[in-house]
Image (cartoon, rainbow, N blue to C red):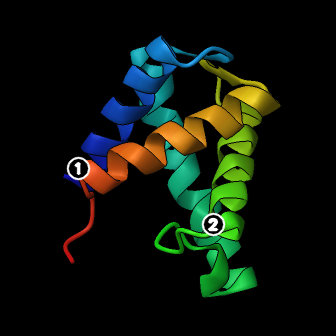
Amino acid sequence: MRFVVSALVLWVVAMVVPGVTATLMGAVFAALAIAAIGWVAEAMLGDKVSRQNRGFVGFISAAVVIWLAGQVVPGFNVGILGALLASLVIGLVDTVVPTTIR
């Protein structure tokens, strides 16, 4: 369920955030890439870069992960400013519609 919600959120974010474009399949593959890149980043850098960390480091690391996904996923394009805005919007959406069971 979390993957489906993440893909849909990315697709909607691409519709409303300037600097982010995605097809539906691009959003699906971007959600996969973001999950994989985020897992590697957490494994290498520890919990301080996890998305549960709502501080500045978590925000910036989420933006970097989104930007990296945009570099490797066809159908998902994002610039640096778009990644920052997408990270902010996704963080706000996650506070309203959490994708993990707390």
Amino acid type assigned to the residue bearing label 1 in the image: Val
Residue, disc 2:
58
Question: How many numbered marks have been drawn onto this rendered protein structure?
Answer: 2
Q: Residue at x 69, y 27 (%)?
A: 82
Amino acid type assigned to the residue bearing label 2 in the image: Gly
- Please rate how many residues cluster around mark 2, counting C-alpha atoms within 10 Å: few if below 14, some from 14 to 19, many from 20: some
Q: Quadrant of residue 42?
A: bottom right
- Could you say which is closer to the camera, residue 89 or residue 3? 89
Distance Cα–Cα, label 2 vs label 1: 18 Å
Q: Position of residue 18 (x, y in %)?
A: 63, 14
Q: Is residue 10 above or below residue 14?
A: below
Residue, disc 1:
97
Q: Residue at x 46, y 50 (%)?
A: 91
- Could you say which is closer to the camera, residue 15 or residue 5? 15
Q: Position of residue 81 (x, y in %)?
A: 77, 29
Residue 43 lies left or right of residue 89; in this view the side is right
Counting residues from the N terminus, which is met first, the one under dot 2 or under dot 1? 2
Q: Quadrant of residue 76?
A: top right
Q: Position of residue 87 (x, y in %)?
A: 58, 44
Q: Quadrant of residue 83?
A: top right
